[in-house]
Image (cartoon, grey):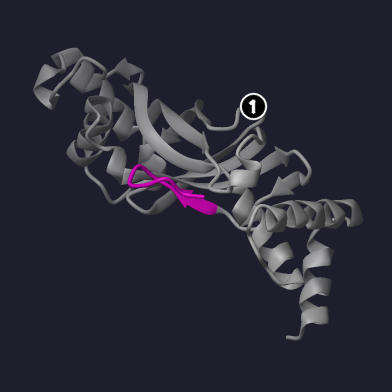
Amino acid sequence: MDEDDTLGLVSRKFSGVQVLRIFCVSLLLSLGGVQCSPVQSVTRTLSQIALPGFRLVRVSDVQLGGISLQNLRSAADLTVEQVLQLQQLLQQQTLPLVFTAHLQVVNISESAALRNVPITIRQIRWQLLIDQQPTVAGTVTQPVRVPAGQSMVIPIQVNVDLARFFRNKQYQQLLDLALQLARGEGLHRIALEMQPTLEIPIVGTYRYPQPIRVDATRIRR
Protein backbone atom coordinates (compact mmCIF):
# COMPACT_ATOMS: atom_id res chain seq x y z
CA MET A 1 0.00 0.00 0.00
CA ASP A 2 1.46 3.40 -0.97
CA GLU A 3 1.44 6.51 1.19
CA ASP A 4 -1.73 8.01 -0.37
CA ASP A 5 -3.65 4.77 0.18
CA THR A 6 -2.49 4.63 3.79
CA LEU A 7 -3.58 8.19 4.45
CA GLY A 8 -6.92 7.49 2.84
CA LEU A 9 -7.47 4.44 5.05
CA VAL A 10 -6.56 6.39 8.18
CA SER A 11 -8.76 9.30 7.18
CA ARG A 12 -11.79 7.06 6.79
CA LYS A 13 -11.43 5.95 10.41
CA PHE A 14 -11.67 9.51 11.75
CA SER A 15 -13.69 12.59 10.90
CA GLY A 16 -11.99 15.45 9.04
CA VAL A 17 -11.76 17.44 12.25
CA GLN A 18 -10.15 14.53 14.09
CA VAL A 19 -7.56 14.03 11.34
CA LEU A 20 -6.69 17.73 11.56
CA ARG A 21 -6.36 17.44 15.31
CA ILE A 22 -4.12 14.41 14.97
CA PHE A 23 -1.84 16.28 12.57
CA CYS A 24 -1.67 19.14 15.08
CA VAL A 25 -0.63 16.71 17.79
CA SER A 26 1.91 15.19 15.40
CA LEU A 27 3.40 18.62 14.83
CA LEU A 28 3.58 19.17 18.57
CA LEU A 29 5.33 15.85 18.99
CA SER A 30 7.84 16.67 16.26
CA LEU A 31 8.62 19.98 17.95
CA GLY A 32 9.19 18.02 21.13
CA GLY A 33 11.80 15.88 19.43
CA VAL A 34 9.69 13.00 18.05
CA GLN A 35 10.46 12.82 14.31
CA CYS A 36 8.07 10.92 12.02
CA SER A 37 7.05 10.87 8.38
CA PRO A 38 3.53 12.23 7.63
CA VAL A 39 2.07 8.72 7.48
CA GLN A 40 3.86 7.64 10.64
CA SER A 41 2.65 10.82 12.36
CA VAL A 42 -0.99 9.83 11.85
CA THR A 43 -0.61 6.16 12.68
CA ARG A 44 1.65 6.67 15.70
CA THR A 45 0.19 9.79 17.26
CA LEU A 46 -2.36 8.01 19.43
CA SER A 47 0.26 5.63 20.80
CA GLN A 48 2.58 8.58 21.49
CA ILE A 49 -0.20 10.30 23.39
CA ALA A 50 -0.08 7.08 25.42
CA LEU A 51 -3.59 5.73 25.49
CA PRO A 52 -4.42 4.84 29.10
CA GLY A 53 -3.35 1.51 30.50
CA PHE A 54 -5.86 -0.95 31.98
CA ARG A 55 -5.39 -3.71 34.53
CA LEU A 56 -7.59 -5.77 36.84
CA VAL A 57 -6.37 -5.18 40.38
CA ARG A 58 -8.82 -7.08 42.57
CA VAL A 59 -12.35 -8.34 43.09
CA SER A 60 -14.59 -7.76 46.10
CA ASP A 61 -18.06 -8.47 47.49
CA VAL A 62 -18.10 -12.04 46.16
CA GLN A 63 -21.42 -13.86 46.57
CA LEU A 64 -22.41 -17.30 45.35
CA GLY A 65 -26.09 -18.18 45.28
CA GLY A 66 -26.83 -15.21 47.50
CA ILE A 67 -24.26 -16.28 50.12
CA SER A 68 -21.40 -13.90 50.92
CA LEU A 69 -18.02 -15.62 50.66
CA GLN A 70 -15.88 -12.72 51.83
CA ASN A 71 -14.98 -14.17 55.21
CA LEU A 72 -14.70 -17.80 54.14
CA ARG A 73 -11.40 -19.56 53.57
CA SER A 74 -12.64 -22.94 52.37
CA ALA A 75 -15.77 -24.98 51.67
CA ALA A 76 -15.58 -26.25 55.26
CA ASP A 77 -16.54 -22.78 56.47
CA LEU A 78 -20.00 -23.08 54.90
CA THR A 79 -22.86 -24.12 57.16
CA VAL A 80 -24.92 -27.20 56.38
CA GLU A 81 -27.82 -24.93 55.43
CA GLN A 82 -25.62 -22.97 53.01
CA VAL A 83 -24.33 -26.12 51.33
CA LEU A 84 -27.88 -27.39 50.86
CA GLN A 85 -28.90 -24.01 49.45
CA LEU A 86 -26.11 -24.06 46.86
CA GLN A 87 -26.72 -27.65 45.87
CA GLN A 88 -30.44 -27.02 45.47
CA LEU A 89 -29.72 -24.08 43.20
CA LEU A 90 -27.40 -26.21 41.10
CA GLN A 91 -30.09 -28.88 40.79
CA GLN A 92 -32.29 -26.12 39.39
CA GLN A 93 -29.51 -25.43 36.86
CA THR A 94 -28.60 -22.05 38.24
CA LEU A 95 -25.70 -20.83 40.40
CA PRO A 96 -25.33 -17.04 40.30
CA LEU A 97 -21.89 -15.62 41.07
CA VAL A 98 -21.90 -11.91 41.90
CA PHE A 99 -18.81 -9.76 42.49
CA THR A 100 -17.23 -6.39 41.82
CA ALA A 101 -14.22 -6.31 39.50
CA HIS A 102 -11.93 -3.35 40.13
CA LEU A 103 -10.42 -2.02 36.90
CA GLN A 104 -7.40 0.28 37.20
CA VAL A 105 -6.99 2.99 34.54
CA VAL A 106 -3.50 4.52 34.31
CA ASN A 107 -2.98 7.79 32.44
CA ILE A 108 0.79 8.21 32.28
CA SER A 109 2.22 9.41 28.95
CA GLU A 110 5.73 8.63 27.76
CA SER A 111 5.65 11.74 25.58
CA ALA A 112 7.23 14.77 27.26
CA ALA A 113 5.10 17.05 25.07
CA LEU A 114 1.82 15.50 26.17
CA ARG A 115 2.29 14.59 29.80
CA ASN A 116 -0.39 17.00 30.95
CA VAL A 117 -3.28 15.56 28.95
CA PRO A 118 -6.27 14.32 30.98
CA ILE A 119 -8.41 11.56 29.52
CA THR A 120 -12.10 10.87 30.08
CA ILE A 121 -13.39 7.30 29.86
CA ARG A 122 -16.79 7.83 28.25
CA GLN A 123 -17.86 4.21 27.97
CA ILE A 124 -16.48 0.70 28.29
CA ARG A 125 -18.09 -2.27 26.60
CA TRP A 126 -16.87 -5.45 28.25
CA GLN A 127 -17.25 -9.20 28.32
CA LEU A 128 -16.10 -11.37 31.20
CA LEU A 129 -13.86 -14.36 30.53
CA ILE A 130 -13.52 -17.09 33.15
CA ASP A 131 -10.80 -19.66 32.48
CA GLN A 132 -10.62 -18.22 28.92
CA GLN A 133 -14.34 -18.86 28.31
CA PRO A 134 -16.53 -15.88 27.35
CA THR A 135 -19.48 -15.34 29.67
CA VAL A 136 -21.64 -12.29 30.44
CA ALA A 137 -21.22 -8.86 28.86
CA GLY A 138 -22.07 -5.34 29.93
CA THR A 139 -21.34 -1.64 29.51
CA VAL A 140 -19.90 0.96 31.87
CA THR A 141 -21.69 4.20 31.02
CA GLN A 142 -20.63 6.49 33.87
CA PRO A 143 -17.88 8.84 32.57
CA VAL A 144 -14.62 8.78 34.53
CA ARG A 145 -12.01 11.53 34.19
CA VAL A 146 -8.42 10.41 34.71
CA PRO A 147 -6.01 13.34 35.26
CA ALA A 148 -2.61 13.25 33.58
CA GLY A 149 -0.04 11.26 35.51
CA GLN A 150 -2.64 9.61 37.72
CA SER A 151 -4.67 6.43 37.92
CA MET A 152 -8.26 5.69 38.83
CA VAL A 153 -10.12 2.50 39.71
CA ILE A 154 -13.47 1.78 38.07
CA PRO A 155 -15.74 -0.76 39.82
CA ILE A 156 -17.55 -3.10 37.42
CA GLN A 157 -20.51 -5.06 38.75
CA VAL A 158 -20.59 -8.64 37.50
CA ASN A 159 -23.44 -11.14 37.74
CA VAL A 160 -22.73 -14.44 35.99
CA ASP A 161 -24.68 -17.71 36.24
CA LEU A 162 -21.95 -20.34 36.53
CA ALA A 163 -24.37 -23.19 35.88
CA ARG A 164 -25.27 -21.69 32.52
CA PHE A 165 -21.72 -21.29 31.23
CA PHE A 166 -20.02 -24.25 32.92
CA ARG A 167 -22.37 -27.18 32.58
CA ASN A 168 -19.42 -29.56 32.43
CA LYS A 169 -18.08 -28.54 35.86
CA GLN A 170 -19.07 -30.11 39.13
CA TYR A 171 -20.40 -28.33 42.21
CA GLN A 172 -17.05 -28.45 44.00
CA GLN A 173 -15.21 -26.95 41.02
CA LEU A 174 -17.61 -24.02 40.82
CA LEU A 175 -17.46 -23.48 44.57
CA ASP A 176 -13.65 -23.52 44.49
CA LEU A 177 -13.65 -20.87 41.75
CA ALA A 178 -15.88 -18.58 43.80
CA LEU A 179 -13.85 -19.13 46.97
CA GLN A 180 -10.59 -18.39 45.13
CA LEU A 181 -12.02 -15.08 43.95
CA ALA A 182 -13.24 -14.25 47.45
CA ARG A 183 -9.80 -14.97 48.93
CA GLY A 184 -8.06 -12.85 46.28
CA GLU A 185 -6.33 -15.90 44.81
CA GLY A 186 -8.41 -16.39 41.67
CA LEU A 187 -7.81 -13.13 39.86
CA HIS A 188 -5.67 -14.96 37.29
CA ARG A 189 -8.74 -16.94 36.23
CA ILE A 190 -10.70 -13.95 34.96
CA ALA A 191 -10.19 -11.33 32.25
CA LEU A 192 -12.18 -8.63 30.48
CA GLU A 193 -12.47 -8.22 26.73
CA MET A 194 -12.96 -4.44 26.59
CA GLN A 195 -13.68 -1.82 23.96
CA PRO A 196 -13.35 1.60 25.61
CA THR A 197 -14.48 4.94 24.22
CA LEU A 198 -12.28 7.88 25.26
CA GLU A 199 -12.41 11.66 25.12
CA ILE A 200 -8.91 13.04 24.53
CA PRO A 201 -8.08 16.76 24.29
CA ILE A 202 -7.05 17.78 20.75
CA VAL A 203 -7.87 14.35 19.34
CA GLY A 204 -11.53 14.29 20.41
CA THR A 205 -13.56 11.09 20.78
CA TYR A 206 -11.67 7.87 20.19
CA ARG A 207 -13.13 4.37 20.31
CA TYR A 208 -10.81 1.40 20.29
CA PRO A 209 -11.21 -0.27 16.87
CA GLN A 210 -10.80 -3.73 18.40
CA PRO A 211 -11.40 -5.09 21.90
CA ILE A 212 -8.38 -5.47 24.17
CA ARG A 213 -8.00 -8.24 26.73
CA VAL A 214 -7.33 -6.96 30.23
CA ASP A 215 -6.28 -9.14 33.16
CA ALA A 216 -4.18 -8.91 36.32
CA THR A 217 -0.82 -9.83 34.79
CA ARG A 218 0.18 -6.47 33.32
CA ILE A 219 -1.07 -3.05 32.26
CA ARG A 220 -2.63 -3.31 28.80
CA ARG A 221 -3.03 -0.33 26.44
Q: Quadrant of residue 196?
A: top right
- Residue 53: % across, % down: 50, 43
Question: For the stretch drawn in magenta, what is the main secondary structure?
Answer: loop
| Amino acid type at mark 1 | Arg
Seen in the picture, residue 89 relative to 125 is either above or below; the reply is above
- Residue 98: % across, % down: 40, 26
Nearer to us in this view, 78 or 127: 127
Nearer to us in this view, 106 or 69: 106
Nearer to us in this view, 23 or 138: 23
Would residue 95 be visible to someone looking at this image? no
The residue lying at 12 percent from left, 17 percent from top is 77
Nearer to us in this view, 170 or 188: 188
Left or right of 194, for residue 38: right
Callout 1: helix, strand or loop? strand
Would residue 173 be visible to someone looking at this image? yes
Quarter placement of the N terminus: bottom right
Left or right of 218, for residue 83: left
Q: Which residues are magenta?
A: 212-221
The residue lying at 19 percent from left, 13 percent from top is 81
Q: Which residue, given by chain and number where applicable, does mark 1 sit on?
A: 145
The residue lying at 71 percent from left, 72 percent from top is 37
- Residue 215: % across, % down: 39, 45
